[in-house]
Amino acid sequence: MAIEIGIIGGSGLYDMEGLTDRQDVSLRTPFGDPSGPYTTATLHGRRVAFLARHGAGHRLMPSELNFRANIYGFKTLGVERILSASAVGSLREDYKPLDIVIPDQFFDRTRGRISTFFGRGLVAHVGFAHPICGELAGVAAAAGRTVGATIHDRGTYVCMEGPAFSTLAESTSYRAMGFDIIGMTNLQEAKLAREAEICYTTIALVTDYDCWHPDHDSVTVEMIIANLVRNATTAQRIIAQAVKTMPASRGCACGRALEHALITRPQHVPDAVKAELAPIVGKYLK
Protein backbone atom coordinates (compact mmCIF):
# COMPACT_ATOMS: atom_id res chain seq x y z
CA MET A 1 0.00 0.00 0.00
CA ALA A 2 1.40 3.41 -0.99
CA ILE A 3 2.33 5.92 1.68
CA GLU A 4 0.01 8.84 0.99
CA ILE A 5 -0.07 11.04 4.11
CA GLY A 6 2.85 12.68 5.90
CA ILE A 7 2.70 13.82 9.52
CA ILE A 8 5.22 16.26 10.99
CA GLY A 9 5.28 16.35 14.77
CA GLY A 10 6.43 19.56 16.42
CA SER A 11 7.30 20.50 20.00
CA GLY A 12 5.69 17.98 22.33
CA LEU A 13 4.57 15.64 19.54
CA TYR A 14 7.40 13.18 19.00
CA ASP A 15 5.34 10.09 18.18
CA MET A 16 1.80 9.07 17.26
CA GLU A 17 -0.50 6.68 19.08
CA GLY A 18 -2.58 4.24 17.06
CA LEU A 19 0.10 3.45 14.48
CA THR A 20 0.32 -0.20 13.43
CA ASP A 21 2.70 -2.06 11.13
CA ARG A 22 5.40 0.41 12.14
CA GLN A 23 8.75 0.52 10.42
CA ASP A 24 11.48 3.14 10.74
CA VAL A 25 12.93 4.24 7.42
CA SER A 26 16.19 6.20 7.31
CA LEU A 27 16.74 8.24 4.16
CA ARG A 28 19.63 10.24 2.79
CA THR A 29 18.72 12.95 0.31
CA PRO A 30 20.72 15.14 -2.10
CA PHE A 31 20.26 17.85 0.54
CA GLY A 32 21.58 15.82 3.46
CA ASP A 33 19.84 13.96 6.27
CA PRO A 34 16.29 14.63 7.46
CA SER A 35 15.61 15.31 11.14
CA GLY A 36 15.50 11.58 11.80
CA PRO A 37 13.99 8.37 10.52
CA TYR A 38 10.46 8.37 9.13
CA THR A 39 8.08 6.05 10.94
CA THR A 40 5.97 4.44 8.23
CA ALA A 41 2.81 2.85 9.54
CA THR A 42 -0.90 2.28 9.11
CA LEU A 43 -3.44 4.62 10.73
CA HIS A 44 -7.16 4.04 10.19
CA GLY A 45 -6.37 1.90 7.18
CA ARG A 46 -4.22 4.57 5.50
CA ARG A 47 -0.46 4.40 5.06
CA VAL A 48 1.29 7.32 6.72
CA ALA A 49 4.83 8.51 7.40
CA PHE A 50 5.58 10.33 10.66
CA LEU A 51 8.61 12.57 11.21
CA ALA A 52 9.59 14.30 14.46
CA ARG A 53 10.59 17.76 13.21
CA HIS A 54 13.18 18.44 15.90
CA GLY A 55 14.63 14.93 15.99
CA ALA A 56 14.85 12.41 18.80
CA GLY A 57 14.97 14.18 22.14
CA HIS A 58 14.21 17.57 20.52
CA ARG A 59 17.86 18.27 19.69
CA LEU A 60 17.46 20.52 16.62
CA MET A 61 16.73 24.26 16.84
CA PRO A 62 14.39 25.79 14.24
CA SER A 63 17.32 27.42 12.43
CA GLU A 64 19.14 24.06 12.32
CA LEU A 65 16.34 22.13 10.63
CA ASN A 66 17.09 20.67 7.22
CA PHE A 67 13.73 21.58 5.72
CA ARG A 68 14.70 20.52 2.20
CA ALA A 69 15.74 17.04 3.32
CA ASN A 70 12.58 16.62 5.41
CA ILE A 71 10.19 17.48 2.58
CA TYR A 72 12.26 15.70 -0.08
CA GLY A 73 12.12 12.56 2.06
CA PHE A 74 8.33 12.71 2.19
CA LYS A 75 8.25 13.16 -1.59
CA THR A 76 10.41 10.11 -2.24
CA LEU A 77 8.15 8.06 0.04
CA GLY A 78 5.20 8.97 -2.21
CA VAL A 79 3.46 11.34 0.21
CA GLU A 80 0.87 13.65 -1.37
CA ARG A 81 -0.42 15.40 1.76
CA ILE A 82 1.31 16.68 4.89
CA LEU A 83 -0.37 17.47 8.21
CA SER A 84 2.10 19.55 10.22
CA ALA A 85 1.64 20.12 13.95
CA SER A 86 3.42 23.07 15.51
CA ALA A 87 3.48 24.88 18.86
CA VAL A 88 2.79 28.62 18.55
CA GLY A 89 2.27 31.73 20.63
CA SER A 90 -0.92 33.74 20.30
CA LEU A 91 -1.02 37.38 19.22
CA ARG A 92 -4.77 37.67 19.86
CA GLU A 93 -6.75 37.68 23.08
CA ASP A 94 -9.40 35.40 21.54
CA TYR A 95 -6.86 32.80 20.36
CA LYS A 96 -6.37 31.27 23.78
CA PRO A 97 -3.82 28.78 25.09
CA LEU A 98 -4.89 25.23 24.14
CA ASP A 99 -6.88 26.54 21.16
CA ILE A 100 -6.02 25.19 17.71
CA VAL A 101 -5.43 27.47 14.73
CA ILE A 102 -5.46 26.34 11.10
CA PRO A 103 -3.72 29.35 9.51
CA ASP A 104 -4.29 30.34 5.91
CA GLN A 105 -1.40 32.81 5.56
CA PHE A 106 2.27 33.24 6.49
CA PHE A 107 4.55 36.21 6.99
CA ASP A 108 8.31 35.65 6.82
CA ARG A 109 10.60 37.07 9.51
CA THR A 110 13.36 34.47 9.14
CA ARG A 111 16.86 35.22 7.88
CA GLY A 112 18.88 33.22 5.38
CA ARG A 113 16.99 29.95 5.58
CA ILE A 114 16.97 27.90 2.38
CA SER A 115 13.37 27.43 1.33
CA THR A 116 13.60 26.23 -2.27
CA PHE A 117 14.76 23.11 -4.07
CA PHE A 118 15.68 25.16 -7.10
CA GLY A 119 18.82 26.94 -8.25
CA ARG A 120 22.08 25.43 -9.48
CA GLY A 121 20.91 25.81 -13.07
CA LEU A 122 17.16 25.29 -12.70
CA VAL A 123 14.88 28.24 -12.05
CA ALA A 124 11.27 27.90 -10.93
CA HIS A 125 8.73 30.31 -9.45
CA VAL A 126 5.72 28.66 -7.80
CA GLY A 127 2.55 30.49 -6.91
CA PHE A 128 2.37 31.07 -3.15
CA ALA A 129 -0.40 33.64 -2.71
CA HIS A 130 -2.39 30.99 -0.88
CA PRO A 131 0.31 28.98 0.92
CA ILE A 132 -1.96 26.42 2.59
CA CYS A 133 -3.95 23.76 0.77
CA GLY A 134 -7.56 24.83 1.36
CA GLU A 135 -8.89 21.32 0.89
CA LEU A 136 -6.51 19.81 3.45
CA ALA A 137 -7.05 22.71 5.87
CA GLY A 138 -10.78 22.06 5.71
CA VAL A 139 -10.26 18.40 6.57
CA ALA A 140 -8.05 19.34 9.55
CA ALA A 141 -10.50 21.97 10.85
CA ALA A 142 -13.45 19.59 10.58
CA ALA A 143 -11.45 16.89 12.35
CA GLY A 144 -10.64 19.30 15.16
CA ARG A 145 -14.27 20.17 15.69
CA THR A 146 -15.24 16.50 15.64
CA VAL A 147 -12.87 15.71 18.51
CA GLY A 148 -14.09 18.71 20.50
CA ALA A 149 -11.17 21.11 20.08
CA THR A 150 -11.62 24.87 19.88
CA ILE A 151 -10.72 25.59 16.25
CA HIS A 152 -9.90 28.87 14.51
CA ASP A 153 -9.86 28.06 10.82
CA ARG A 154 -7.97 31.07 9.55
CA GLY A 155 -5.15 33.35 10.62
CA THR A 156 -1.71 34.64 9.71
CA TYR A 157 1.29 32.79 11.12
CA VAL A 158 4.35 35.04 11.41
CA CYS A 159 7.45 32.86 11.19
CA MET A 160 10.33 34.31 13.21
CA GLU A 161 13.97 33.22 13.26
CA GLY A 162 14.42 32.35 16.92
CA PRO A 163 15.60 30.65 19.00
CA ALA A 164 14.92 33.59 21.36
CA PHE A 165 11.32 34.72 21.57
CA SER A 166 10.12 38.16 20.47
CA THR A 167 10.96 41.43 22.11
CA LEU A 168 7.97 43.37 23.41
CA ALA A 169 8.40 45.89 20.57
CA GLU A 170 8.33 43.11 17.98
CA SER A 171 5.33 41.39 19.53
CA THR A 172 3.38 44.66 19.70
CA SER A 173 4.29 45.44 16.10
CA TYR A 174 3.08 42.02 14.89
CA ARG A 175 -0.26 42.64 16.57
CA ALA A 176 -0.52 46.06 14.97
CA MET A 177 0.13 44.45 11.57
CA GLY A 178 -2.79 42.10 12.11
CA PHE A 179 -0.90 38.84 12.59
CA ASP A 180 -2.54 36.12 14.69
CA ILE A 181 0.02 33.55 15.82
CA ILE A 182 3.80 33.29 15.92
CA GLY A 183 6.12 30.33 15.46
CA MET A 184 9.56 29.42 14.14
CA THR A 185 9.21 26.59 11.62
CA ASN A 186 6.26 26.24 9.30
CA LEU A 187 6.88 28.75 6.53
CA GLN A 188 9.81 26.86 4.98
CA GLU A 189 7.88 23.60 5.15
CA ALA A 190 4.95 25.17 3.33
CA LYS A 191 7.13 26.64 0.56
CA LEU A 192 9.01 23.42 -0.06
CA ALA A 193 5.83 21.33 0.03
CA ARG A 194 4.34 23.58 -2.63
CA GLU A 195 7.42 23.14 -4.83
CA ALA A 196 7.20 19.38 -4.29
CA GLU A 197 3.50 19.48 -5.27
CA ILE A 198 2.47 18.17 -1.84
CA CYS A 199 -0.64 19.49 -0.10
CA TYR A 200 0.27 21.12 3.21
CA THR A 201 -1.56 22.47 6.23
CA THR A 202 -0.51 23.55 9.70
CA ILE A 203 -2.25 22.47 12.88
CA ALA A 204 -1.01 25.26 15.15
CA LEU A 205 -1.21 24.47 18.85
CA VAL A 206 -1.38 27.57 21.05
CA THR A 207 0.76 27.12 24.16
CA ASP A 208 0.62 30.67 25.55
CA TYR A 209 0.24 34.33 24.68
CA ASP A 210 3.27 36.05 23.19
CA CYS A 211 4.97 38.70 25.33
CA TRP A 212 2.52 41.48 24.31
CA HIS A 213 0.03 40.08 26.82
CA PRO A 214 -0.03 41.76 30.26
CA ASP A 215 -0.07 38.33 31.97
CA HIS A 216 2.88 37.00 29.97
CA ASP A 217 5.44 37.46 32.74
CA SER A 218 3.43 35.20 35.02
CA VAL A 219 3.69 32.30 32.58
CA THR A 220 6.16 29.68 33.79
CA VAL A 221 8.09 27.03 31.89
CA GLU A 222 6.08 24.41 33.78
CA MET A 223 2.82 25.93 32.51
CA ILE A 224 4.05 25.93 28.92
CA ILE A 225 5.23 22.32 29.15
CA ALA A 226 1.87 21.29 30.61
CA ASN A 227 0.13 22.96 27.68
CA LEU A 228 2.51 21.26 25.25
CA VAL A 229 1.56 17.87 26.67
CA ARG A 230 -2.16 18.63 26.49
CA ASN A 231 -1.81 20.05 22.99
CA ALA A 232 0.09 16.96 21.83
CA THR A 233 -2.79 14.76 22.96
CA THR A 234 -5.28 16.97 21.12
CA ALA A 235 -3.10 17.06 18.01
CA GLN A 236 -2.93 13.27 17.87
CA ARG A 237 -6.72 13.03 18.03
CA ILE A 238 -7.12 15.66 15.29
CA ILE A 239 -4.55 14.01 13.03
CA ALA A 240 -6.09 10.56 13.50
CA GLN A 241 -9.55 11.92 12.67
CA ALA A 242 -8.20 13.82 9.67
CA VAL A 243 -6.51 10.70 8.32
CA LYS A 244 -9.71 8.74 8.86
CA THR A 245 -11.84 11.24 6.90
CA MET A 246 -9.31 12.24 4.22
CA PRO A 247 -10.76 12.03 0.69
CA ALA A 248 -9.27 9.22 -1.35
CA SER A 249 -8.04 11.59 -4.04
CA ARG A 250 -7.03 15.24 -4.19
CA GLY A 251 -9.36 17.81 -5.70
CA CYS A 252 -7.00 20.78 -5.33
CA ALA A 253 -4.32 22.27 -7.60
CA CYS A 254 -1.35 21.46 -5.34
CA GLY A 255 -0.39 18.48 -7.46
CA ARG A 256 0.10 20.80 -10.47
CA ALA A 257 2.07 23.56 -8.74
CA LEU A 258 5.05 23.21 -11.09
CA GLU A 259 3.02 22.94 -14.28
CA HIS A 260 3.83 26.50 -15.35
CA ALA A 261 6.54 27.31 -12.79
CA LEU A 262 9.69 25.91 -14.43
CA ILE A 263 11.42 28.72 -16.31
CA THR A 264 14.70 27.17 -17.46
CA ARG A 265 14.57 25.39 -20.81
CA PRO A 266 14.97 21.64 -20.27
CA GLN A 267 18.06 21.36 -22.48
CA HIS A 268 19.87 23.89 -20.29
CA VAL A 269 19.21 22.14 -16.97
CA PRO A 270 22.37 20.36 -15.70
CA ASP A 271 22.03 16.59 -15.74
CA ALA A 272 23.07 16.40 -12.09
CA VAL A 273 20.24 18.71 -11.07
CA LYS A 274 17.74 16.74 -13.15
CA ALA A 275 18.85 13.59 -11.37
CA GLU A 276 18.72 15.15 -7.89
CA LEU A 277 15.25 16.60 -8.41
CA ALA A 278 13.81 13.70 -10.42
CA PRO A 279 11.17 12.89 -7.75
CA ILE A 280 9.94 16.48 -7.99
CA VAL A 281 10.47 17.59 -11.61
CA GLY A 282 10.90 14.31 -13.45
CA LYS A 283 7.47 14.39 -15.05
CA TYR A 284 8.20 17.84 -16.50
CA LEU A 285 11.81 17.34 -17.63
CA LYS A 286 11.79 14.24 -19.77
Image (cartoon, rainbow, N blue to C red):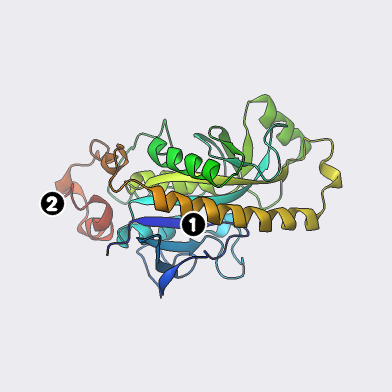
Q: Along the horizontal axis of the image, is 15 left or right of 2?
A: right
Taking the spot 49% from the left edge, 34% from the top edge, the residue there is 104
Q: How many marks?
A: 2
**Helix, strand or loop at disc 2?**
loop
Q: Disc 1, disc 2: CB below 8 Å?
A: no
Place residue 71 in its image quadrant: bottom left
- What is the number of the mark on residue 122? none
**Which quadrant, please, contains the N terminus?**
bottom left
Residue 255: x percent and y percent?
Answer: 28, 43
Nearer to me, 64 or 5: 5
Q: Can residue 45 be seen in this view?
A: yes
Q: Along the horizontal axis of the image, is 91 left or right of 149?
A: right
Nearer to me, 173 or 101: 101
Q: Compared with residue 42, is residue 280 higher up or lower down, i.e. above or below?
A: above
- Specify few, some or many for label 1: CA neighbours under 10 Å numbering under 14, 14-19, or 20 or more: many
Q: Mark 2 is on which residue type? A: Lys
Which residue matches tag 1? Answer: 8
Circle nearer the viewer, 1 or 2 = 1
- What is the number of the mark on residue 286? 2
Q: Compared with residue 12, is residue 251 higher up or lower down, i.e. above or below?
A: above
Q: Compared with residue 139, is residue 40 higher up or lower down, i.e. above or below?
A: below
Nearer to me, 204 or 116: 204
